[in-house]
Image (cartoon, coloured by chain):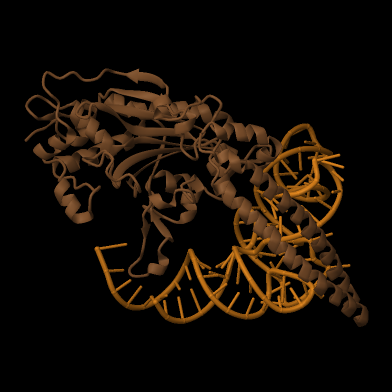
Amino acid sequence: MLDIKLIRDQPDFARERLATRGTGDEACIDELLKLDEQRRKLLAEVETLKARRNRASKEIGALMGQKKTAEAEAKKAEMRELGDRIAALDKQALEAGAAQDQLMLRLPNLPHESVKIGKTAADNPVVRVHGKKAVFAFKPKSHVELCESLKLVDFARATKLSGSGFLLYTNWGARLERALIQMLLDLHTGEHGYTEVSPPFVVGPQCLEGVGQFPKFKDQYYGVVEGDKTAEMGKLYLVPTAETPVANIHREEILKESQLPVYYCAYTPCFRGEAGAAGVGTRGMIRVHQFDKVELIKIVKPEHGYDELEKMVANAEKVLQLLGLHYRVVLLCTGDLGFASAKTYDLEVWAPGQGSYLEVSSCSNCENFQARRMNLRFKTEAGENKFPHLLNGSGTALARLFVALIETHQQADGSVLIPAALQPYFKADRIHV
RNA sequence: GGAGAGAUGGCAGAGUGGUUUAAUGCACACGCCUGGAAAGCGUGCAUACCCAAAAGGUAUCGGGGGUUCGAAUCCCCCUCUCUCCGCCA
């Protein structure tokens, strides 16, 4: 959520920054300003009346104490009338506030000034490239072929169980997935200073609202029902990313300045409805309804937000380096930026069998956009309450990492070599038939 | 799922319709005192919003609704916590 005071004081700045997203959201600034003015006018009015009533009520108490019943009754009648006006005005003020909130919750974050203005992913500048595309003396297979020949994933039976878009890892495939999860958690906790947490995989709607997934993108997530209580539908949702539970851990809290920065990392499966995405790249493991991910979350002082973002990107890159993968880092342009983010780097790993780069990580500084939504603050040494910056980054997503890994390290004989860093977890150096 | 008891500020804890402007204690900060410290004394110490600022005002005692001129206090609904019972990995 943006700061209404910023919109009030610098509407042109907010309009101009929002416009760079190309979503047309800047159009509602005028309506927002109107609603805000209306709300404040009503508030001032109703508060004046309430102040008068509070004073009168005390006087009534005093009059009754002095047994001046007639005077007290006269004042009571007067206040009854005032009470009706207060109730009516109160309702209006509340409605104006609710309308304003609805609008505010649907307004995306302002892109940071360092973000390139652009329209689509094609405009994203490549910041740096690591390694080179693997060269093969043979035609590299796609991960789908490798998974079938090495029996790493049983696509057909997964579909039988849960429909399309779900995966049944088998044998070496299941072990590889587990080894990757453990390697990444060990890396981030052991080398990068993150504290491991294991959150619930279902969360209440307030968590989705807190990070900006609700109310605008409500159609993309899975709601759960306990037993046959269909009335409970929508009370809980499967997490679309660990960001949802983990970023909300300290919601509605006031942290001490000395507690910052907070670094969390968590493994969770991620569940995504991907509404409207059917038919696009659905074959294989690139776009699925459930995948594993190790997520990084930081809560930091505002002045450190962007240094911490760079460090987080480096932490995610380390994963790809250890696995011997070629990748590039791109900076998302304003048009490609996520709803809550002010600045995002994507890590795209090369998948030789696909002949394309796959997004395996997205690291964002959401500044105080999410902190405002979840009312997460910290108290400075001077005693002032401030909103911290919230950062999230994949460290990394696994299904696509799995794809890049087996496609990159496949051999002419159809086997796949396991990188040295992963061997202690995988307990073998090669996958073969 | 059943029965009972609870939810008040950073913590503890009083407050059952009107000087409560939420007492008191602890913790914390600052000052006095001291050679220095402890103790003692004094002052301060929730959040948000309205107001250009100040002064002031409004709201908030788990959440929502109601009664009333007035609600932490009375009524209704919900959530959560604790104790016991049942079921369960």
Q: Is residue A405 above or below residue A45?
A: above
Specify the quadrant that holds the N terminus of chain A. Answer: top right
Residue A256 spot, x, y in % from top left = 59, 42
Residue A41 lies left or right of residue A97; in this view the side is: right
Foreground pick, A242 / B64? B64
Specify the quadrant that holds the C terminus of chain A. Answer: top left
Q: Which chain is orange?
A: B
Q: Which residue does the image show at 81% across and 62% down from the upper left? A: A49
Residue A215 lies left or right of residue A86; in this view the side is: left
Foreground pick, A418 / A197? A418
Q: Which residue does the image show at 41% across and 28% down from the upper left? A: A313
Residue A26 spot, x, y in % from top left = 58, 38
Foreground pick, A46 / A424? A46
Q: Is residue A247 above or below residue A22?
A: below
Q: Residue A233 appears in which quarter of the rendering?
A: bottom left
Residue A28 showing in the rendered view: yes
Chain A colour as displayed? brown
Residue A34 spot, x, y in % from top left = 69, 47
Residue A320 spot, x, y in % from top left = 30, 27
Residue A301 showing in the rendered view: no
**Numbered circles on residues, count:** 0
Q: Is residue B44 above or below residue A350?
A: below
